[in-house]
Image (cartoon, rainbow, N blue to C red):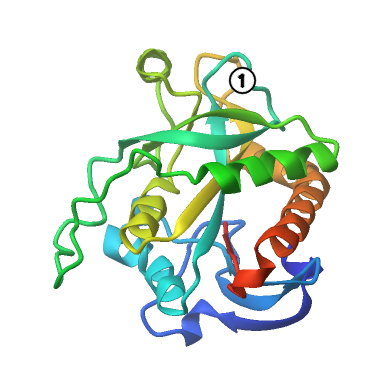
Amino acid sequence: MAQALENPCEIAYDELPGFPRSTVSGHAGTLLIGLLAKTPVMVLNGRAHFYEGYDLSEVTFPIRVLAACQIRDLLLTNAAGGVSPRLHVGDFMVLRDHINLMGANPLRGMVRGDRSSFVDLRRAYDPALSRMLNQAGKEAGLKLRTGVYLAVSGPSYETPAEIRAFARLGADAVGMSTVPEVIVARYYGLRVAALSCITNLAAGRTDHPVSHAEVLATGFRVQDSALALLRKFAQRYRLRRGARKKAPALSD
């Protein structure tokens, strides 16, 4: 997607004070500003993770920068393991809710002034943006799923017993990111939508070992479909929300 931007300005995270550097293969670590389907966007191309040793305040720092840039709409993407039997490798799932089992909250210690850290997360994911994402999927010829994302700290993958427990809790997919960014985005009043690519089946759903190589391979295989989806989403966003003259942000 980064290569599909029109007239992009690219800035390495190394050049941005406070931005953490990702050490994970597949995460470029650059901020891109440009046009996607004639829609102005800021793209966080790669993210830092809690499991890399960063504090959640560091992990979510780029979201605070987007808020300071007056971004109002945020689309987050991630790679996730499929917990629900209705999800298959290569599927895309629109998040309707999440479960935070990372053992930490990025708002801890962030009480400042009149802004309350007791954020209401009943609608963490904006219904209008999520509908727009589903409509974009239809236009791109994709059948999007909808479900609950469960976040763990990682970096080790889950055991089959943990996956069975997560399923009983109501999780459809599991991953090691996104939830901290969503919480901080809602703290700043950003509207959020999120999309998971099911890059592997969770432990116990297959006899094959779970590996990061499989995650990267699936991501590469579905990249054209993902780009088509994001283009359609950007087009819909421009048509429906362009009057507000606020650029959406896309984060992976």
Residue sitting nearer the eye, 89 or 124: 124
From this view, report whether residue 17 is shown above or below residue 101. Answer: below
- The residue at 65%/63% (across/down) is 241
As drawn, 121 above or below 18: above
Residue 115 placement (x, y as % from top left): 20, 66
Relative placement, left or right, of 184 versus 44 is left
Point out the image quarter for the C terminus. bottom right
Could you tell me residue 204's position as x and y percent? 50, 14
- Image quarter of the N terminus: bottom right
Residue at the spot of label 1: 208
Callout 1: few (<14), some (14-19), or many (20+) C-alpha neighbours within 10 Å?
few
* Residue 181 figure quarter: bottom left
In this view, the residue in front, 121 or 91, is 121
Mark yes or no: residue 206 visible: yes
Tell me: residue 24, above or below residue 198.
below
- Considering every residue shown, the one lying at the far front of the view is 243
Q: Nearer the viewer, residue 196 or 216?
A: 196
Q: Residue at x 18, y 60 (%)?
A: 116
Nearest to the observer: residue 114 or residue 66? 114
Please, what secondary structure does the residue beneath circle 1 have?
loop
State how many labels appear: 1
Q: Quadrant of residue 245?
A: bottom right
Position of 37 with respect to 30 (left or right) is right
Q: Position of residue 102 (x, y in %)?
A: 30, 40
Which residue type does callout 1 highlight?
His
Q: What residue is drawn where x is 36% and y is 55%?
A: 186
Q: Residue at x 47, y 44 (%)?
A: 125
Q: Is residue 78 in sight in this rendering? A: no
Is 212 placed left or right of 61 in the picture? right
Q: Position of residue 42 (x, y in %)?
A: 60, 72
